[in-house]
Amino acid sequence: MIKIFVIAFFSISMNLVFASESEKETKIIQIFAAQKVNEQIQTQLDYAKGEQFELFAKRIFNKTLSGHPEASKITNEKASELLVQFMKKCTEGVTTESVLKDAAKIYGESLTDQDVDLILAYYQSTVGKKDVAATVKISAFIGSSILQIMSDQFDKQLPALIKDLDKAATNQD
């Protein structure tokens, strides 16, 4: 009788924990939506699966598979096409939803249910929505700012590079 009670209590307790974790995860996904994290992930996935993805696949082919004994029997274009298809199949399960679900687990590790409720309430508030809008705006600025700073540094460092190249060329003789 006691064993049955303990097993039943443990079973009910575990179901409550799982329900709580599921509810917590759902709320974290809502926080991510309010923060526009899902859009950021989708942008990264589109980039990774887009033109860069194909360039990466071709680079893998050229560096590794081009020396395969059977590779000489087909054209480089066909072998590259097969590699791109292979890589696309490998990434089929990589979706915004799967990334969000994994991220929600990590995000929630150090947060209590109450913390999650407070964070969600903030992002659903007027000021939280303004915060997200400002963050999205500044994110675009940060990206272009980094590129501009790098471009300025390139312009600044180019004369020194030319001098170093000239010096190296004269020392080769």
Image (spheres, helix red, strand yellow):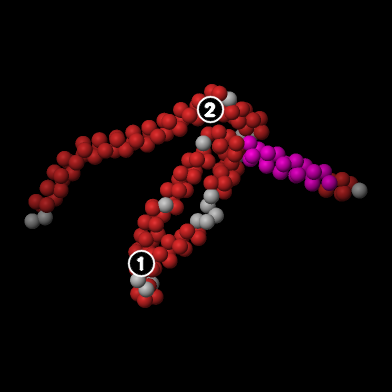
* Residue in front for this viewpoint, 70 or 137: 137
Query: Which amino acid, mark 1?
Result: Glu
**Residue sitting at 59 percent across and 41 percent down?**
104
**Residue 125 in the image, given as x and y percentages of width and height:** 58, 25
Does residue 61 appear in the picture of this structure?
yes
Disc 2 is placed on an element classified as: helix
What whole-number distance in Å separates the C-alpha atoms at marks 1 and 2? Answer: 49 Å
Query: Which amino acid, mark 2?
Result: Lys
The residue that mark 2 highlights is 129
Q: Is residue 117 left or right of residue 156?
A: right
Q: Is residue 46 above or below residue 89?
A: above
**Residue sitting at 36 percent across and 60 percent down?**
59
Q: Quadrant of the C terminus?
A: bottom left
**Residue 131 in the image, given as x and y percentages of width and height:** 50, 27
**Residue sitting at 60 percent across and 31 percent down?**
120
Q: Please give the range of residues in magenta.
A: 8-27
**Residue 48 in the image, given as x and y percentages of width and height:** 43, 50
